[in-house]
Amino acid sequence: MNETAAPPEIAVQTHQLTRRYGTTLAVDRLDMTVYRGDLFGFIGSNGAGKTTTLRILATFLAPSEGTATVLGHDIVKEADAVRHIIGYMPDFFGVYKDMEVTEYLDFFGACYKIPAARREQTVNDVLELVGLTHKRGELIGALSRGMQQRLGLARVLIHDPKVLLLDEPASGLDPRARIEVMAILQELQRLGKTIIISSHILSELQSLCNRVAIIEKGRLIYSGPVQGVRDQMAPGRVVWARVADDPAKAAELLRQRPEVSEVEEVDGRLRITLTDHEVDHAIVPEVLVKGGFRLLEFREDELGLEEVFLRVTRGETA
């Protein structure tokens, strides 16, 4: 008896979501789905509509048209319910620099009506999760930018939200601090959180996220798996090969194969485009070796997320 796997549960869904500022269309009929457990990258240039979308999902802005739900709750009709299950971190947030770290988190715990008897343990737990336990008695003003970002993430987690909306959480951080923040996000995903993260650091989103959306001028250009956007943009699977001698002859041999659509010689190496992504790229070394060529190098060409972003967008803003 064949069992069909249950479809993934939807965490966040928008339908024809639209937001206007006067005559400016900031978000244009956005249809987007995020599944539970996703670490979802939201990609776009400045002014593309990312922050507006996240603010609408966080119930800070009302849509001009369309609808959105978070774990089944309508963001307009059930805004209070949505606020209890999300954690929203803006790209810039104010902190009370004269407060101690624990005082700051205790204050927000009280705002979320966490009982006083539980707040101390809750604060300790989120500080441990973001790696700030050793800074619990420090004044916020004495923390580095990276530590303040981690404290902001701890604040977002204080009420144990199921969905996190993070707007440029690594903005302005040095490379080490960015890596530390990204590691925390991976741990949160492992703990079952659904995370939407907007970022310009596309190389990090490529390895961090399982699914992405690309938005430009308020319109959705792509939404789906990271590998899917690469496959959609590349005409076919691309591999590189280098042979010991006579690359021109090797190129001619490969062009005779039906699995190969194009062969270019670039600085003594061969750039081979296969007819589609389903073709097994192992056919290339097999053909070359059987043809009597000594293979010195063979690798697949990975189309990076940054290159994909540049190909599918024009740099337009709303």
Image: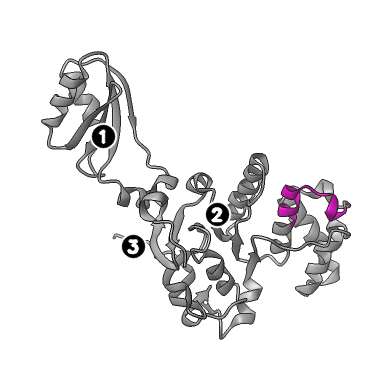
Kindly indicate whether the residue at mark 1 contacts the one at mark 2 (C-beta within 8 angstroms): no
Classed neighbour count for the residue bearing mark 2: other residues with Cα under 10 Å, few (<14), some (14–19), many (≥20): many
Camera-nearest residue between 260 and 313: 313
> In the rendered view, how is the structure colored?
one colour
Q: Main secondary structure of the magenta part?
A: helix
- Label 3 secondary element: loop
Rendered residue at 36%/54% (across/down): 312
Q: Residue 40: which disc?
A: none
**Camera-nearest label, 2 or 1:** 2
Mark 2, residue position: 199
Q: Is residue 261 left or right of residue 57?
A: left
Rendered residue at 53%/52% (across/down): 200
Picture quarter with the N terminus:
bottom left
Q: Which sits earlier in the primary sequence, circle 3 or circle 2?
A: 3
Instruction: Give above or below for 309 relative to 59.
Output: above
Q: Amino acid at mark 3?
A: Thr
Q: Which sits earlier in the primary sequence, circle 2 or circle 1?
A: 2
Q: Quadrant of residue 194?
A: bottom right
- In the image, the segment drawn in magenta is 139-151
Spatial separation of the CA atoms under disc 1 and disc 3: 31 Å
Query: Is residue 140 highlighted in magenta?
Result: yes
Mark 1, residue position: 281
Question: Residue 195, percent across and down?
Answer: 56, 60
Q: Is residue 1 left or right of residue 90?
A: left
Q: Taking the image as drawn, is residue 81 in sight?
A: yes
Instruction: Give above or below for 29 relative to 163.
Output: below
Camera-nearest residue between 5 and 191: 191
